[in-house]
Image (tube, rainbow, N blue to C red):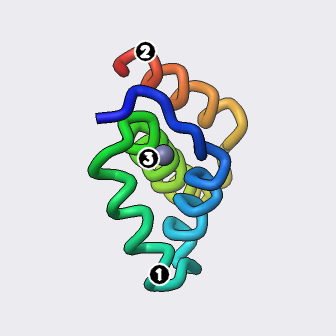
Amino acid sequence: MKENCSHQVDCLKMIQLILDGEATEQQLAKLQINLESCQPCIRMYHLEKEVKELLTKRMEKRCCPDELVATIKSRILSFS
Ligand SMILES: [Zn+2]
């Protein structure tokens, strides 16, 4: 398991595409391989996923997303 990701920017882009449902099958497969071997990407994936889910919920209620994102991120990062 890798502790550091040398392609984190690419990984993040891919994760966001996937969470937006806009990734190609090729990108999905690539990320899947990544998530089995790359610790920072696993963490990033779960972080982005949780933020997105909560934002979606909050958006329906029209609440302050910026503050919420900061809260979630700090909470998740303190666990990892
Ligand atoms: Zn990675």
Which residue occupies 68% across, 30% down?
Answer: 67
Is 78 on the left-hand or right-hand side of 71? Answer: left
**Residue 78 numbered tag:** 2
Residue mark closest to the camera, 3 vs 1:
1
Q: Which residue was labeled with disc 1?
A: 26
Q: CA separation, marks 3 and 1?
A: 24 Å
Mark closest to the chain's N terminus, 3 or 1: 1
**Residue 60 numbered tag:** none
Along the line of sight, the residue nearer the viewer: 28 or 74: 28
Mark closest to the chain's N terminus, 3 or 2: 3
Give the quarter of the figure containing the C terminus: top left
Instruction: Say which quarter of the image contains residue 75.
Output: top left
Q: Check disc 3: other Cα within 10 Å, few if <14, some if 14-19, many if 20+.
A: some
Instruction: Say which quarter of the image contains residue 59.
Output: bottom right
Along the line of sight, the residue nearer the viewer: 53 or 5: 5
Q: In the image, is residue 70 above or below residue 45? A: above
Q: Which residue was labeled with disc 3?
A: 50
- What percent of the width, then of the height, locates residue 71? 56, 25
- What percent of the width, then of the height, locates residue 46? 40, 45
Q: CA separation, marks 3 and 2?
A: 15 Å
- What percent of the width, then of the height, locates residue 45? 44, 48
Q: Check disc 2: other Cα within 10 Å, few if <14, some if 14-19, many if 20+.
A: few
Q: Are marks 3 and 1 in contact (CB under 8 Å)?
A: no
Query: Which amino acid is tagged 3?
Result: Glu
